[in-house]
Amino acid sequence: MNRAIRRLALVVFAGFGVIVLALTWVQGVAADRYRDDPRNARLSLGQAGRERGLILSADNVILARSAASAGDPRSFTRVYPQEDRYAHVVGYASVLFGDAGLEETEASTLVSKQDSTISGLLAVLTGGDLRARGLRLTIDDDLQRIAVAALADQDGAVVALDPRTGAVLALASSPSFDPNRLVGIDGAGAGDEIAADPARPRVSRARQEIYPPGSVFKIVTAAAALEVGAANPATTFPDPAELELPGSTATIRNFDRQPCRDGSSVDLADGFARSCNTVFGQLGMVLGGDTLVAQAEALGFNADIPFELPVARSQIPAAAELSGDLPAVAQTALGQRDVRATPLHMALIAGGVANQGTIMAPYVVAETIDADGEVVDTTISAEWRRAVSPATAAVLTELMERVVTSGTGRRAAVPGVRVAGKTGTAEVPGGPPHAWFAGFAPVAAGPEERQIAVAVLVESGGEVGEEATGGSVAAPIAAEVIAAWLGV
């Protein structure tokens, strides 16, 4: 009997021990993870009145700060001095609408740890600094201003980044909104108004929306041909005014409905510079779906882009869906049909060409700073993927430079700077085309020389509408951003 009681007692004590250990783990070790989990409904309420650290641009312009309440110095309200210019990057911290942007994804860094949790008390006892930490971003405020101004009132996006590091230099989206209107308990009306706006100003066109890329996708198709040796810049193709697609009544025509050159033959270099659909439709069918999709996926299509903010996946159909369907492959090679991409991704692809075929992971947080302004953590640039060989990148650079010097991208030219790029005019069923430009400058930049990769998208041709092309609408915006960054 005594032995049975002893065994029962041991089991009971062991059970209590497990419970104590579990509670200790949850309250002392994993408390921050549970507390900061976005699925925690109490998260926004718990953080609502607490101080958050500064968010600064790369050139130390204040993008977000906490202001103490006049009635209670321990309660804080978030203030966004630049209003709508950084709404899609910084986001907002709102009592009524929760958090968005970096205010959400970096909340565990920004929010003061001065609370009554066990983890907070342990940090005090061990001498930890519970004051709110801040962020210094990679975005240059002057460049962001220019990108926003260049878009003007046109719906679209401008993305600029450093191709060698992945640091985002500008991330502009239009239309935007003023996050100050969503802060505080009196922001319900403004929130409803913004949410009901059919232009969807809370959506970042730069990273949350995917679009048919049109002819900027020809960078991908050309890369596939060069990588497998299916074509080179001197490879010639027939030059019909209309390309008939086998096994189909569908045809492919150039933008002006004319032959690309003389109606006889045209080489790949000329076809790329003039953005000839007939050339790239033929090239797509030569490559086939397997090769085209493999190259697109090597460049990041159908993959998640690592970034501090959510990014929509750029899409291309699986090779199996294109197998045996040459008309579908031809249209896909033009960046039409079911191909979709974000402006951020197209900027990364342009940056990969500039960076000898290696695409760097994009990032927007350069440093974490403590309450005294001292740097406590620095982001280290990292490779995302080796997309093409250096040799292929070099040939693509030549093709893209020719687009700007003598092709469809002449309006992206910057005096005294070698600019490489590709225009795109993406057809949209039932509406005007989207205008695109993706490129970089300067070509062959020295190791100490500034370099920039840019992608510009203007929805539905902006103010030009039906007559819009990537060369007439998006290329001039890219030129303005490039010139500003390079100081010319």
Image (cartoon, rainbow, N blue to C red):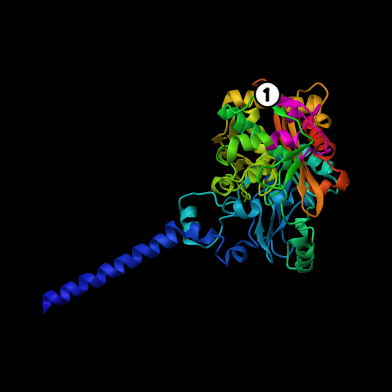
Question: Range of the magenta residues?
Answer: 253-281
Can I make out residue 292 in this image?
A: no
Across and down, in percent, residue 24 comes to: 39, 62
User: Which quadrant holds residue 178?
Assistant: bottom right
| Residue at image mark 1 | 233
Which residue is more in the foreground, 297 or 8? 297
Can I make out residue 231 in this image?
A: yes
Quadrant placement of the C terminus: top right
Left or right of 26 in this view: 244: right
Inspect the magenta stretch and tell me whether residue 284 lies in it.
Answer: no
Q: Residue at x 85, y 49 (%)?
A: 153
Q: Residue at x 66, y 41 (%)?
A: 330
Across and down, in percent, residue 313 comes to: 61, 49
Across and down, in percent, residue 278 comes to: 73, 36
For mark 1, does the 10 Å Cα neighbourhood hold few (<14), some (14 to 19), or many (20 or more) residues? some
User: Which quadrant holds residue 296?
Assistant: top right
Inspect the magenta stretch and tell me whether residue 273 lies in it.
Answer: yes
Left or right of 450 in this view: 154: right
Which residue is more in the foreground, 449 or 83? 449
